C-alpha cells in the first residue's frame, strides 16, 4: 500500500518543543514596544514577541504612522508553558488567553506561546491600535470589529506578513445563519441589538469580517478601499459605500454573498521592516521577586487581590519600588485610601519612576486630611513628572494661595497654555484672584471678565459680577476669597474594584477532540480521519488541506498511510462542528501531534 506524505495534502511547519530547564524558570524578553514573561523557553518567547512586533509594525505601516514611535501604552505579555501554569490566572472557563486593558499598561495573557492562541487576544489588541489612531467615535462598529478579526489572520512569512486567510468559525457562521440587512449592519452602533444580543452577535461579527475582507482584498473593491476609508470616517457609511463604489446596497450585498461562496481565498503579502531592537530582543532570566511582582500585578488587574497579597508576601521584596506600587493599587481598588497612600509613599521613597503613581498619590493626598505642606510637596513632585496635568496644576495653585504663596501660584498657573471650554470658568476665576493678590488689577479684570463669560451657575455669576465691580471701582465693596475657597478640587477616580473575569470579551474557541488516529481515507483532494477518543470512534473531514494548521512536537515530515495507521498516532483535532447528524463530526481546522 503506498505511503503518502502529509506534505502531499497540506503544507506542514514543524517546530521542536521549547526547552525549559525547570518548571519555575522564567525569562523576560523585551523590545521597544513589548515586555514578555514566559516559562516556555527562549526561542518560543522570541517567536511570540516577534509576532506582536510584526503585527504592530504592519498596522502602523498601512496607516502611515511612524513605526518607531513609542507604544500607545506599555504592553506586557505573559506566555505560559501549559494549561496548569495558566489555570490560576484564567478569568473564565474555556479560554486560552485574554487581553486585559489597564490605565497605564495593557496585558496579553496566553495559555501557550503558540500562534493558534493568538487570535483570542489579537482581536482586542487591534481595537487598541485602531482606537488610538481613529477613535471609537469615528470608527463604525462593523469596520472596527471586521478589522480586528481580519488582522487575527496575520501570519509571519520571513520579512513579510500574510493577511486574509478565511476564518473557519466565522465562515461557518456565515453559512449557517440568517444574513443581516446590509444597511442595518453598516449603521449599527454600540446600542444595536446586533452587537449586544447573544443570538445576533455571532452573525454581526462574521458578516463584518467578511465585508471588510471583500473591501480590502476583493478584486472589485480593493482599488478604491483607501478612498472609502477617507470618506467613511467623515460621513454616513451607507452613503460612503455607495458613492465610492458607484453601486447600490443591493448590488454590494449580492457581491458579498457571492464572495462568501468563492473558492478562491484572497490574501495579501506585505513587507514588514522591523527595528533592530525588535529583531534582536533583550533576553534575561528573572528572579523570583520580579516574577512575583509581575504576576501579582496581573492578579490585581483581574480582581484576585488575596492571591496577589499572598504572592508578594511569599518572596523578599525589600528595597523594591514595584512591590509597594502593586500593593498601593490593590488597596486603592479595595477602597483603602490610607493604606494606598502609605504604599505609594514607600514606592516613591524607593525611587519609583512611574509618573502616574506620583499623580495618583498627589490626588489621594489632596482629598485627604494630611497637613497642607505635605500635600503640596506631593503635588509639586507630581507636576515635575506630569507638567501638563490641568487638575493637578490648579490644585497646586489653590493650596499655594492658601499658604500665602501667591506669586508661586501665579507662576504655576501661567504654565497652563491651553484651556478647554469646560475648564475655562474655573481657570480664569482662580487666576483672576491670584493676579489680584499679586497687585495686577488690570490682568485680574481681564481674567475675571473671561470667567464671567464662561460661568454657568447663577451664584458664581453673581460673585464674579461683584468682583468685577470692585476691580473697576475699589470703593464698590471688598471682594471675598470665594474665588479660591470654592474652586473645584481635582476629582479622584478610583480604579476598580474590577471583579474577576471582567476582561475584554474574546472570540469562542473551536472544539477539540483528543485521541489516536487509527485510519485515514484518501478521497481525492479530501480526506477523512478516523480517531478513537474517550467517547468512542469519531470521523473528521479534511475539506481543504491548505486551510489547516499543523502543530507538532517533533521535526521532519509527518507521513500517513492511506488506510489503517500502524501504529496509531496520538492526535488532537480542532474542528468546526457539522450539523445534521451526519457521519462526520466536523471539518478539520487544525491538527496537533503531541
Image (cartoon, rainbow, N blue to C red):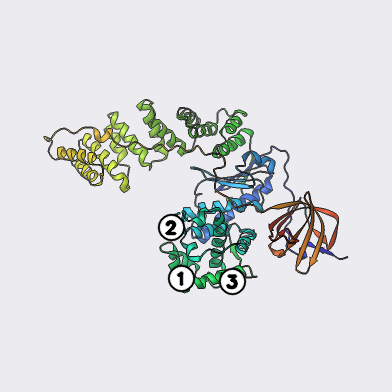
Q: CA distance from mark 3 to mark 2?
A: 29 Å
Circle 3 SS class: helix
Q: Along the line of sight, which residue is nearer the eye, 307 or 582? A: 582
**Of discs 1 and 2, which sits in the foreground?**
1
Q: Going from the N terminus, do you reach mark 3 or mark 1 first?
A: 1
For the residues bearing labels 3 and 1, Cβ distance under 8 angstroms: no
Q: Local crowd at mark 1 within 10 Å, few (<14), some, or many (≥20)?
A: some
Give the residue number, with chain letter if any, for mark 3: 258
Residue 4 left/right relative to 119? right
Up/down of 418 relative to 58, above or below:
above
Location of residue 72 with respect to 393 vertically, above or below: below
Question: Hey, which residue is sitting farthest front in the picture?
Answer: 581
Q: CA distance from mark 1 to mark 2?
A: 19 Å
Task: Provide residue 456's location: percent of width, then percent of height.
Answer: 26, 44
Could you tell which of marks 3 and 2 lies nearer the N-terminus? 2
Secondary structure beneath label 2: loop
Labelled disc at residue 138: 2
Please tell me which residue is depicted at 60% across the width and 37% down the height of the picture: 295
| 490 horizontally vs 146: left or right | left
Residue 53 x %, y %: 58, 53
| Rendering quarter of residue 209 | bottom right
Mark 1 or mark 2: whose residue is earlier in sequence: 2
Q: Secondary structure at mark 1?
A: helix
Give me the residue at 36% from left, 27% from top. 373
Distance between mark 3 and mark 1 Cα atoms: 18 Å
* Image point (43%, 33%), residue name: 361
| Front-lying residue, 415 or 462 | 462
Disc 3 packing (10 Å; few <14; some 14–19; many ≥20) = few
**Where is residue 520 shown, x and y percent of the image?**
81, 61
Disc on res. 242: 1
Q: Is any part of residue 524 visible from this angle?
A: yes
Is 156 left or right of 396, judged from the image as shown? right
Amino acid at each position: 500500500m503506498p505511503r503518502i506524505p502529509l506534505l502531499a495534502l497540506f503544507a506542514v511547519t514543524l517546530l521542536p518543543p521549547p526547552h525549559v530547564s525547570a518548571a519555575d524558570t522564567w525569562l523576560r524578553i523585551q523590545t521597544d514596544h513589548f515586555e514578555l514573561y514566559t516559562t516556555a523557553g527562549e526561542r518560543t518567547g522570541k517567536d511570540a514577541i516577534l509576532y506582536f512586533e510584526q503585527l504592530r509594525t504592519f498596522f502602523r505601516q498601512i496607516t502611515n504612522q511612524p513605526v518607531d514611535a513609542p507604544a500607545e501604552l506599555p504592553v506586557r505579555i505573559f506566555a505560559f508553558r501549559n494549561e496548569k501554569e495558566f489555570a490560576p490566572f484564567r478569568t473564565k472557563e474555556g479560554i486560552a488567553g485574554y487581553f486585559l486593558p489597564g490605565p497605564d499598561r495593557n496585558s496579553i495573557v496566553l495559555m501557550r506561546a503558540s500562534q493558534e492562541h493568538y487570535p483570542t487576544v489579537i482581536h482586542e489588541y487591534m481595537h487598541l491600535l485602531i482606537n488610538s489612531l481613529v477613535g471609537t467615535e469615528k470608527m463604525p462598529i462593523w469596520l472596527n470589529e471586521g478589522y480586528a478579526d481580519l488582522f487575527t489572520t496575520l501570519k509571519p512569512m520571513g520579512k513579510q506578513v500574510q493577511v486574509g486567510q478565511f476564518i473557519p468559525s466565522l465562515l461557518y457562521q456565515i453559512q449557517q445563519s440568517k444574513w443581516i440587512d446590509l444597511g442595518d449592519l453598516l449603521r449599527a452602533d454600540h446600542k444595536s441589538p446586533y452587537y449586544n444580543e447573544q443570538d445576533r452577535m455571532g452573525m454581526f461579527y462574521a458578516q463584518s469580517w467578511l465585508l471588510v475582507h471583500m473591501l480590502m482584498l476583493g478584486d472589485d473593491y480593493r482599488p478604491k478601499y483607501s478612498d472609502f476609508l477617507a470618506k467613511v470616517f467623515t460621513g454616513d457609511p451607507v452613503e460612503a459605500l455607495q458613492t465610492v463604489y458607484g453601486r447600490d446596497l443591493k448590488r454590494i450585498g449580492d457581491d458579498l454573498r457571492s464572495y462568501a461562496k468563492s473558492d478562491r481565498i484572497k490574501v495579501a503579502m506585505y513587507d514588514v521592516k522591523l527595528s533592530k531592537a525588535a529583531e534582536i530582543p533583550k533576553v534575561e532570566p528573572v528572579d523570583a521577586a520580579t516574577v512575583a511582582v509581575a504576576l501579582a500585578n496581573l492578579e490585581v488587574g483581574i480582581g484576585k487581590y488575596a492571591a496577589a497579597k499572598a504572592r508578594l508576601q511569599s518572596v523578599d521584596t525589600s528595597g523594591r519600588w514595584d512591590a509597594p506600587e502593586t500593593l498601593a493599587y490593590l488597596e486603592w481598588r479595595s477602597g483603602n485610601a490610607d493604606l494606598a497612600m502609605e504604599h505609594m509613599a514607600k514606592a516613591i521613597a524607593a525611587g519609583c519612576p512611574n509618573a502616574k503613581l506620583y499623580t495618583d498619590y498627589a490626588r489621594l493626598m489632596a482629598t485627604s486630611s494630611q497637613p497642607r505642606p505635605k500635600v503640596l510637596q506631593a503635588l509639586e513632585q507630581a507636576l515635575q513628572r506630569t507638567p501638563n496635568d490641568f487638575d493637578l496644576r490648579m490644585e497646586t495653585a489653590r493650596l499655594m494661595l492658601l499658604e500665602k504663596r501667591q506669586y508661586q501660584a501665579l507662576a504655576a498657573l501661567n504654565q497652563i497654555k491651553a484651556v478647554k471650554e469646560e475648564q475655562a470658568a474655573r481657570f480664569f476665576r482662580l487666576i483672576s484672584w491670584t493676579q489680584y493678590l499679586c497687585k495686577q488689577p488690570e490682568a485680574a479684570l481681564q481674567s475675571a471678565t473671561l470667567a464671567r463669560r464662561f460661568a454657568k451657575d447663577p451664584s458664581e455669576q453673581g460673585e464674579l459680577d461683584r468682583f468685577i465691580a470692585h476691580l473697576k471701582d475699589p470703593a464698590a465693596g471688598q471682594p471675598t476669597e470665594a474665588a479660591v475657597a470654592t474652586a473645584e478640587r481635582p476629582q479622584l477616580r478610583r480604579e476598580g474594584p474590577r471583579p474577576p473575569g471582567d476582561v475584554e470579551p474574546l472570540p469562542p474557541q473551536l472544539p477539540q477532540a483528543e485521541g489516536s488516529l487509527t485510519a485515514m481515507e484518501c478521497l481525492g483532494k479530501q480526506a477523512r480521519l478516523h480517531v478513537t477518543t474517550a467517547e468512542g470512534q469519531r470521523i473528521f473531514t479534511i475539506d481543504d488541506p491548505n486551510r489547516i494548521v499543523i502543530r507538532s512536537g517533533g521535526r521532519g515530515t509527518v507521513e500517513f498511510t492511506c488506510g489503517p495507521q500502524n501504529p496509531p498516532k496520538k492526535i488532537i483535532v480542532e474542528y468546526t462542528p457539522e450539523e445534521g447528524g451526519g457521519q462526520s463530526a466536523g471539518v478539520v481546522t487544525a491538527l496537533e501531534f503531541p
